[in-house]
Amino acid sequence: MMNEDRLGLRPWQLLMVGDGIDQLNTEAREDLARIFDLFPAVSHLVVQTTAGGCRVSRDFSSGYTDEVDQRLAGIFQGNPAVTGITFPETSTRLGHTATRDNPHWSAEGKASADIMAALTRGEIIPDEAAAQLKQLYRQKSV
């Protein structure tokens, strides 16, 4: 397989749900991961097995979006000529342009970061942060 050393660089791992999970050996799982590498726009696959179906998708660890935001901030800081980086619209989210003043990958990024910073500083409790985040994303989906 090509680029086997890339496996450790993925910000995600496979998430598999369904009766057919045990039917997929290690090689099949690696091949499914590589398919996701080759087709980044694919959100999930459904694998049919003799034991039933299995839904396979990417499972991103918590904090990966924070790293994206940090990298965006670094690009703006180190490259004064860069004025914007656009994340195109997808079927699940509106497009957004990160800027020097708003170096976040999503339109909700700055508000979300502010909520998490307040939680970290102890200004709000986890239940309040969860409620505020839920409200933030609920407003954007309407």
Image (cartoon, grey):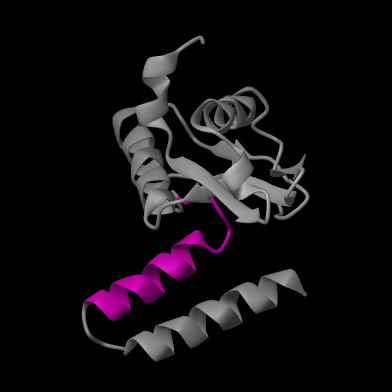
Taking the view exactly as shown, the residue that stands out farthest to the top is 2
Residue at 56% across, 54% down = 106
Which of the pair 21/78 is nearer the observer? 21
* Residue 90 relative to residue 132: left or right: right
Where is residue 124 drawn, in percent x and y? 31, 89
Where is residue 111 drawn, in percent x and y? 47, 69
Residue at 67% across, 49% down = 20
Where is residue 135 drawn, in percent x and y? 59, 83
* Res 95 seen here: no
Where is residue 6 drawn, in percent x and y? 41, 21
* Res 15 seen here: yes
Which of the pair 125/43 is nearer the observer? 43
As for residue 118 lying within the magenta part, the answer is: yes
Residue at 69% across, 40% down = 88
Give the vertical position of 133 relative to 48 (above or below).
below
Q: Which span of residues is magenta-colored?
A: 104-120
Q: Main secondary structure of the magenta part?
A: helix
